[in-house]
Image: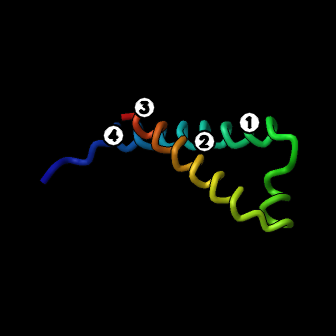
Amino acid sequence: METFQISGVLSALIYSGLGIAVLALVFLLVEIVTKYSINRKISHDGNIALAIVLGSMIIAIGMIISAAIR
């Protein structure tokens, strides 16, 4: 049985927090760059196409961050 490595868990938590912070920063940057509120367009206007594009962008940024962390 392997011994529990606290350094591995700690580094995973640090990298996960860093990845989430970068993902939130990218989302905030997209919100600032666009000339309209993404939240309002998706929730109030029901723009499903924008929600799909935003979701795919979040997945793509997450994959890039995941590959960079490895």
Q: Is residue 64 above or below residue 52?
A: above
Q: Of circles 2 and 1, which is in front? A: 1
**Amino acid residing under circle 4:** Gly
Name the residue carrying label 1: 29
Q: Which mark is residue 68?
A: 3
Q: Nearer the viewer, mark 4 or mark 1?
A: 1
Q: Are marks 4 and 1 in contact (CB under 8 Å)?
A: no
| Circle number at residue 52 | none
Q: Residue at x 34, y 37 (%)?
A: 7
Residue under pointer 4: 8
Q: Amino acid at mark 3?
A: Ala
User: Of callouts 3 and 4, which one flags the residue occurring earlier in the amino acid sequence?
Assistant: 4
Residue 53 rendering spot, x and y as whole percentages? 64, 53
Whole-Å distance between the Cαs marked 3 and 4? 17 Å
Q: Earlier in the sequence, mark 4 or mark 2?
A: 4
Horizontal side of 64 relative to 32 (left or right) equals left
The residue shown at (26%, 48%) is: 4
Residue 34 location, x and y as percent? 81, 40
The amino acid type of the residue labelled 1 equals: Leu
Instruction: State the separation of the CA atoms marked 2 and 1.
Output: 10 Å
x, y (%) of residue 35?
87, 41
Question: Would residue 70 be found to the left or right of residue 20 on screen?
Answer: left
